[in-house]
Image (cartoon, grey):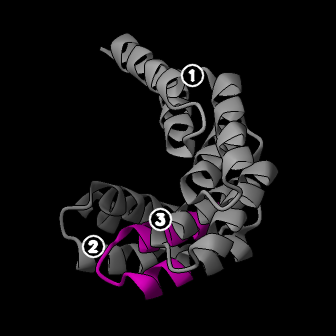
Amino acid sequence: QTAKAVAACENLVKLKPTDPSAQVLLGSAYVDIGRIQEAIACFREALSLDPNCFDAHIGLGRAHFDRGRYGEAVDSYERALRIRPQSADALLSLGIALSSSGRYDEAMQAFKRAKELDPQIAEPQVLTGRAYLRAGMYAQAIECFKDAVEIDGTHAQAYYNLGRAYLRVGDKDLAVQQ
């Protein structure tokens, strides 16, 4: 089915070569199947057609992230946020890229802004907690994971990471309960 989806997107680009959204769809399909270099070319083409194409910046960020080019991913996500500063999803992606590049303080700020924009989702707390775990700040990580569980009692990653954090501070009993 993936091959059919890619072929459909390729046909769409042939039909609408100057439509940035067609390029974004094809680029996203390429990312999904690991054809990252081709995806990057599609996102760049979309941006040449419309420099303010939010989805192209997000897609380019994802492609760079998947290649391990975290700095370039950060740049793409920051450009997307200049276009749509109220995007919690773009802030989460930015935070993940920042955290992956070891920029934990900046990552936590991005996650905090995402939480402020959408306080009903647990993901910013989970991601903040994971950044705290990586930074060795276990007490703060525990609080973030507890908050995430309070927001969404079915968030498996929140429970899993809460257990990991408890293990790091030596509380095996609480870790097992999670």
Secondary structure found at label 2: helix
Secondary structure found at label 1: loop
Of marks 2 and 1, the one in the foreground: 1
**Residue drawn at point x = 56 percent, y = 35 percent:** 23
Crowd class of label 3 (few under 14; some 14 to 19; many from 20; radius 10 Å): some
173 vs 47, nearest the viewer: 47
Q: Position of residue 95 (x, y in %)?
A: 62, 65
- The residue that mark 3 highlights is 89
- Whether label 3 touches label 2, CB < 8 Å: no
Residue 131 on the magenta span: yes
Secondary structure found at label 3: helix
Horizontal arrangement in the rendering, residue 60 relative to residue 11 (left or right): right
- Whether label 3 touches label 1, CB < 8 Å: no
First in sequence: mark 2 or mark 1?
A: 1
In the picture shown, does residue 75 fall above or below 7? below
Amino acid type shown at disc 3: Asp
Residue 17 on the magenta span: no
Horizontal arrangement in the rendering, residue 152 relative to residue 7 (left or right): left
Amino acid type shown at disc 1: Gly
**Residue drawn at point x = 47 percent, y = 65 percent:** 89
- The residue that mark 1 highlights is 34
Crowd class of label 1 (few under 14; some 14 to 19; many from 20; radius 10 Å): some
First in sequence: mark 3 or mark 1?
A: 1
Question: What range is drawn magenta here?
Answer: 112-134
In the picture shown, does residue 65 fall above or below 154? above
